[in-house]
Image (cartoon, rainbow, N blue to C red):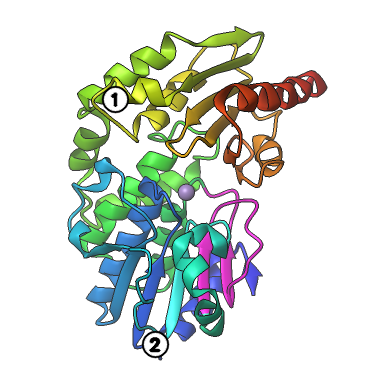
Amino acid sequence: MITADITIAAPAIAALLAPARQILLITHVNPDGDAIGSLLGVWHSLRASGKTAVALAPSALPEYVCCLPGIEHVQVYQAGQELPACDLIWMMDTAALDRAGPVYEEHAPQIHQLPIIVVDHHITNPGEGRINLIDAHAASTAELLTLLLTAMHAPLPPDAATALLLGITTDTQSFQTSSSGVQSLRAAALLLEAGADQQAIVRKLYYALPFGTAQLVGKSFNEIRREGGLIWTHVSQEMRESSEDSEDASDYITQMLQRIDGMQVAVLFKERPDGTVKISLRSIPDIDVAEIATLWGGGGHAQAAGATLQLGLQAAEATVLSVVREAIRQAG
Ligand SMILES: [Mn+2]
């Protein structure tokens, strides 16, 4: 079943959960706030309902989720590890099974034998689970999960609410994205009513910028370029080596690029230690960057997408910018 309708998904998911004894919760590789907020929110809810659940992140967590209550219960997958024992898998915020990275690569046959629940908001999600709640209009997966758990009359303890609210807050950039509307605010209101600690989230997300991130933002902005509505910059390995930090700077830089007056498409090129280049694309509603990202095996949302190129920094810039220039030209 693939549906965007929570009232249809809720009874179907409740029926699948009812007989399950051990539920494995998985999210995407390089997890963000929505991924971990969703994972931990569902974990707390299941635990409060007396279920046994394991929350598994395919790779290391971003620093800003470390304030969440119960975060120590999120396991980070180690290469070669066995898949935790389970009779049901629940995947969240994961646009395709293979976005679970090493967890999927190392256990695909086992994963395919189990019933899978998919809850996601990526437009590119093909719906590979038994029950797939996929709503590309939802601003975050945490928003969908909040409404789903509410529709299922599942427990929503304060720690679950805090985790889910962090997911909504990060994916909407505090209700600024074009996809955040009535439903996002309604979900947030439900979470506040359930006792979410909003101030703890605000302090961690907006008043705790690591010094190394500030250094890296400065270096990257020093190299910013513009051609009409096309704005781009990069983070090289050299810049990272000469700063104190950090993985998380790229999110911050991308958000800043989007704020520039006249931006139609913003691109951040991030050089990885293995020599590949990760691109992060942002756009105004006339231009679909998810479609552009699929050219290199990436994906995401129409206005926020990413991909990894097996090219060096200069070659990646030349390749991507020529495609984006053409997209801007076609959008008029
Ligand atoms: Mn998300």
Query: Which quarter of the picture shows residue 19?
Result: bottom left
Q: Nearer the viewer, mark 1 or mark 2?
A: 1
The amino acid type of the residue labelled 1 equals Thr
Vertical order, 300 against 257 (above or below): below
Magenta stretch: give its range. Answer: 116-138
The residue at which mark 1 appears reads as: 213
Residue 94 on image: x %, y %:
51, 58
Residue 303 in the figure: left or right of residue 291 = left
**Residue lying furthest bottom in this view?**
19
Position of the N terminus, as image quadrant, is bottom right
The residue at which mark 2 appears reads as: 20
Residue 108 on image: x %, y %:
54, 74
Residue 281 on image: x %, y %:
58, 31
- Magenta-span inclusion, residue 52: no
The amino acid type of the residue labelled 2 equals Ala
Out of 197 and 255, give the one closest to the viewer: 255
Vertical order, 47 against 219 (above or below): below
Q: Residues within 10 Å of mark 2 (few under 14, many from 20)?
A: some
Residue at image point 47% right, 85% down: 15
Residue 219 on image: x %, y %:
37, 13
Query: Which quarter of the picture shows residue 132?
Result: bottom right
CB at disc 1 and ligand 1 closer than 8 Å? no
Residue 31 in the figure: left or right of residue 225 = left
Out of 99 and 43, give the one closest to the viewer: 99
Residue at image point 45% right, 71% down: 90
